[in-house]
Image (cartoon, rainbow, N blue to C red):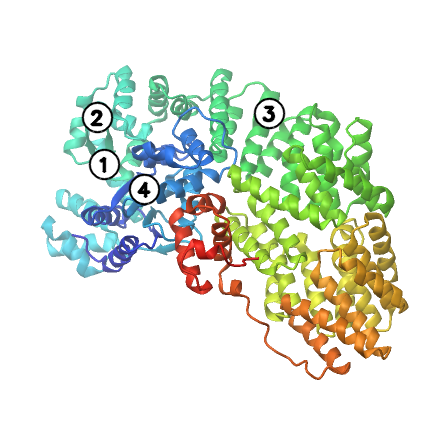
Amino acid sequence: MLYGRSTELAALDELTAGAHEGRSGALVLRGEAGIGKTALLDRTAQSASASGMRVLRVTGVEPEADLAFGGLVQLLWPVQDRLDGLPEPQADALRAVLGATRPPTRDRFLTGLAVLTLLADLAEQGPLLCLVDDAQWLDQATSDALLFAARRLAAEQVAMVFATRDEGFAAPGLTELRPSRLDTGDAVSLLADLGLPPALRDQVIAESAGNPLALIEFGAARRDDPGNFTPVTVADRVLSSYRTQIAALPEKTRLALLFAAAEGRGDLPLQMKAARTLGVGLEDLEDAERAGLIQVTESTVVFRHPLIGTAAYQGAVLARRIAVHQALADAADDPDCRARHLPLATTSPDDEVASELVAAAERAADRSAYAAASLLHQQAARLTPDRRAQVRRLTDAATCALNAGHAGQARDLTEQAERSSPEPEDLARLAPVRAAVMFESGERREAARLLLRTHAAGPGLGPAMLRTGATYGWFAGDADSVREAAERLASLGEADPMVEGMAHLVDDDYARGLPLLERAVAAGQDGSDAARTRALHSAILLGDDAAAMELAAAEVARCRAQGLIGALPQALHLLAERQVLAGAHRDAEASVAEAVEIARDTGLRERVAWLGGVPARIAAIEGDERRCRDLVRDVPDVGRVAGESALSLLELAGGDYEAALGRLETAAGPGPQRHMAMAMATVADQVEAAVRLGQPGRAERPMRAFEAWARAGRQPWALAVAHRCRALVDGREEDYREAVRLHGQGRRPFERARTALLYGEWLRRARRRSEARDTLRSALEDFEGLRAVPWAERARAELRAAGDATTSAKATAENVLDRLTPQELQVVRLAADGNSSREIAAQLFLSRRTVEHHLYKAYPKLGVGSRRELARLNLV
């Protein structure tokens, strides 16, 4: 009987009932020790099993909090026979977790995707309940995987419940429920079986403060010793009560309990194998079992409550704990288990032990358990007698911390390593990690300078450090760093066309810089992953929309195929920016929506904010001022150009030319980033705003730079915009005509429509009204297709002024695809191309059932009833 838990039980029953009905969900039970979380899980497991649900359960164990995937192994061991049904990269990731010999899994989120797919597959046979107790003691790799799966549950018939203490196990995005303390009536009912006198009972209730475990333990203690009372916190009193019970046991029993607490996993054979070396046997557990402190089966030892294990461990003297950990390490067959005990058994530097820890760290990193690997490297460093070897291990610890998403910890570790060694080679090995942390923290110029300063001291690291330093310098607006990186690469015989090209761009030497970027694009088409990445960024700098779109789409496809979930948000971001330029606004929104969801699920908060620049641009084009300003407000400093560009476009469309021009003049500033974003996206806005204000001179300098860039790059859209800008300033019709002609070869419909609008205005003012109407109708058609409401209104106003009395404001015709959510749009397009639900699920990092749920919701919106009918629709 659970007293005072009606609210909690109702929430848990609703969760499991939803799974029976095809609605997945996850819930976090959070509260202090003894509040009744485990009792709620037990009752939920019993109820679920009775209803036919399959139950998987795992309990976090404090000694295993740093053991890579220890919790996941416990959870998935009973269902490992189902791995063969997963997509191969996911199956490999879980085989690595479970100890099979497989290639390394470098993306730390692929395991979470594999867990999601496996749980969804298991739920195909009926609803599934996953229970996680003491989640605050899960290793981070297990926590990351389970939370990734929990946040992406939708229609898989899976329910997940995490029980955790107040501290630890942050689970943003999941519903939390805090079990309440028991009121007096429920406390009296709970104590009824103890037969306490009313006065003593009331004292126990007051002391326990409504904590169920405290009520039980204090009540039993007062019944046996009415004078026992220590005025400390509830948790400390419960722990003290357990220590008192343990202290009353025979010495060998206390030692047997220490083995159980230190081993942590309940592995009775291992405990007994180790305990025999200290003269302890199975019979020594009997007194503890009779006292109700533990439960013993043929293969396991389980403490009745985790605090009992804590009391058994903390109550032992240090020498005993060291001896027990050494015995467990010597008895362990699993090298990772041995590595967990060795640092706790070693108090002075020991290179042999440190080497074992390094090997364990490398195994953890191969399974993408970077947090565990970082800790193992730190432990190895502590036990390493040689100072320089210690620094190398701290460097490896910092690298793993950065890969785990712990930038602050990585910074601390690099600083610790720097203090330990002044050797140039050691500092060079540290530099890439240190610079990456600095760059993410906003110290971009300093990060570039650090890499340039130390590259020569790191054998084999120089070229890579220089390339990264050039990139950091570019984004920092540090032209000197870009130039210096290019010069040093050339001196090493490692000249890089992208870096060399950027070095010319910062000097406004477009004629030499852009051809080099073209070489980088060509070299990356069939090159390595790194070469293709450089090709993509070079194509963006060139303004080569076709190549950039192709390369961005290929990068997204590569991330999907290889399960590179952590890299996918950035790839989708770059693709979405290209889609906006191509006028594919709904596609761009779908890409951003997926990127935001994955970035949130994987803790990439900076990326979530940065992604807002893409929908902000769409909102500006479409005239949605409130949404645009809300989105720009959250864009971080590194994305300032995108935010300012969106706001200036909004102001330009609204006729606030001074605000638009002033914003762009301020945002442009010095530095090479203007060549990437400002020159390609906003110079035309600067020119138009300046001309409307009657101050064309304010835009003359950026316009000349843009013209030189456009001529050197020879991209039709850029040449068209350059002619349009010159036409605005000089008023020559031949520039307008050339701009219109070139737009016919380009890929940017918004720019094409703006050129047609401005040319139409010029024709109307020249009293060539018939020609003006034809040109303005073309602009209106493009604007309406883009839902660019304020621009369409301008085109209609010009048409009316040109004598087109039939043109009136009207609602833009609905595109059937606008009825779909971004994820539904992605799903139906893949389904229409003939992909199976399982194939779509693998590409979009969803479950098969969730894919089918999206199809089920999309069919009526599209007016179809099957995949066959879907394939006949125009989904472009």
Give x and y (percent) for residue 798. 75, 78
Crowd rating for badge 1 (residues with CA inside 10 Å; few <14, some 14–19, many 20+): some
> Residue at 42% across / 56% down in the picture?
854
Identify the secondary structure beneath mark 4.
helix
Looking at the picture, which amino acid does disc 4 mark? Leu
> Residue at 37% across / 23% down in the picture?
322
- Residue 394, by quadrant, is top right
**Residue position for label 2:** 253
> Residue at 37% across / 55% down in the picture?
176
Mark 2 → mark 3, Cα distance in angstroms: 43 Å
User: Which badge, 1 or 2, comes first in the chain's sequence?
Assistant: 1
Mark 1 → mark 2, Cα distance in angstroms: 14 Å
User: Which badge, 4 or 3, comes first in the chain's sequence?
Assistant: 4
**Residue position for label 4:** 122
**Residue position for label 1:** 244
User: Which badge, 2 or 3, comes first in the chain's sequence?
Assistant: 2
**Relative vertical location of residue 182 with respect to residue 332 in this rendering, above or below:** below
**Residue 168 visible (yes or no):** no
Name the front one of labels 4 and 3.
Answer: 4
Crowd rating for badge 4 (residues with CA inside 10 Å; few <14, some 14–19, many 20+): some
